[in-house]
Amino acid sequence: MTARAKTASNHIDYGLLILIVTLIGFGIVMQFSASYAIDLEHPYKFITKHLMWVGLGFISMYAMMLIDYRTWRTLAIPIMIASLGLLVMVLLVGEEGVGGARRHLFGGSIQPSEVAKLAIVIYIAAWLASKGEKVSDVTMGLLPFSVILGGFLALILRQPDISTSALIALTALAMLIVAGADLLQIAILVLVMSGVFIFAITKYDYAMGRVSNFIGAFIAPWSSSEEQIRAAYYALQSGGLFGKGLTNSTFKLGALPLVQSDLIFAVVGEELGLVGALSIVAMFLFLGYKGTRIALHARDDFGRLLAFGITAWIVIQAFINLAVVTVTIPSTGIPLPFFSYGGTSTLMIFTALGILLNISKGGGGRFQLHAHTFLRRRHRRSRVSHTHRRSRA
């Protein structure tokens, strides 16, 4: 038994669970405070739907806690295929949004790129774990990794959704680094990714507009030509140290757009001040610490990479959102986990956290799923022949 296995607990990480519940509760309060004024005739419209998705998320998180995380290694390929299918489907029959973007299916209830975040983390964790030390080899590591990741990114960029593609690329790159990739490989991959995203930004007018507005806002945010950047800056500034008080935001009453989703952090800063804003930063940093600690204590390489990938995804996404509101990077449209309104995003984050909680207790659970549950084959003997050979040996 390895030292890592000895340190693994048979109980979930209750500190992480308490943190998750705290973030959820905080998010619900701020979602209502931010969204009730959007439509005063129907003040509960957004919070009702948000609570519905939070409820579904809790069910999914609990279910994932009961399923051994090693299950997802056996199902990595079917999950990847299903996710790729959804990404193709949204390009063919997805609802057309602003600027011709196609990002949603079934009346906006499903966003395939959100599903892809968890799917790519599971698949890359399984793939990197299977390679072991060979991941530092160019032909066994960098090239196959680039093809796998490139397939997902190409479909998401085609929607177009540059911000989600960048988030997935950063998460995958972090996982590759943790897996032990050579520094030269990392440098090459960063250069290639940078070139791809620069090309994508120059190709789409909306992306170039966001970059141009960001440059202007970074120099003089109070005179920015982009309304949401200017409003978010003023909202944060007006909150002071302790804020104006819960529900007392004035910028959400028409001046600040997207308060229920992309810019909800600006409402937090205005109503709860610097103290409230920094408390959110602290909680996400603590989430990063807890997730990394779980990864370090995981019982196998797959659990280590999966835990780290889930943690990296959620924390990077959170800080991208915070960076947009604080005029640190251009507008992205990335939601703030636990706080922003968004069904598929909420559901997938809760699902991922359920898997992370299962890893924290060393795996195990009431349910065992296998790939052949979904992809049955007539000739099963060939699949178990290696097992029989080992047992005979």
Image (cartoon, grey):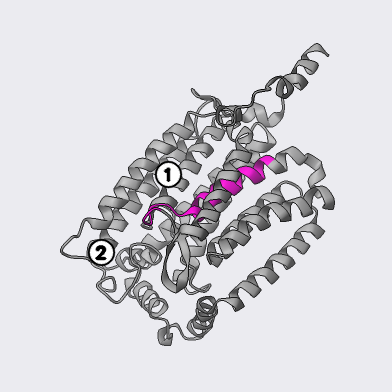
Q: Is residue 220 highlighted in magenta? A: no
Vertical order, 153 against 373 (above or below): below
Residue shown at the point (80%, 12%) measured from the top left: 392
Q: Position of residue 14 (x, y in %)?
A: 45, 35
* Magenta span: 106-126
First along the sequence among labels 1 and 2: 1
Q: Residue at x 76, y 48 (%)?
A: 180
Tag 1 residue: 20
- Residue 55 lies left or right of residue 324; in this view the side is left
Residue identified by numbered label 2: 245
**Residue 292 in sight:** no
Which image quarter: residue 108?
bottom left
In this figure, what is the number of numbered marks? 2
In the picture, the quarter occupied by the C terminus is top right
Q: Is residue 6 left or right of residue 325?
A: right
Query: Is 291 in front, or is 106?
Result: 106
Quadrant in the picture for residue 280: bottom left
Which residue is depicted at the point 43% across and 61% down? 278
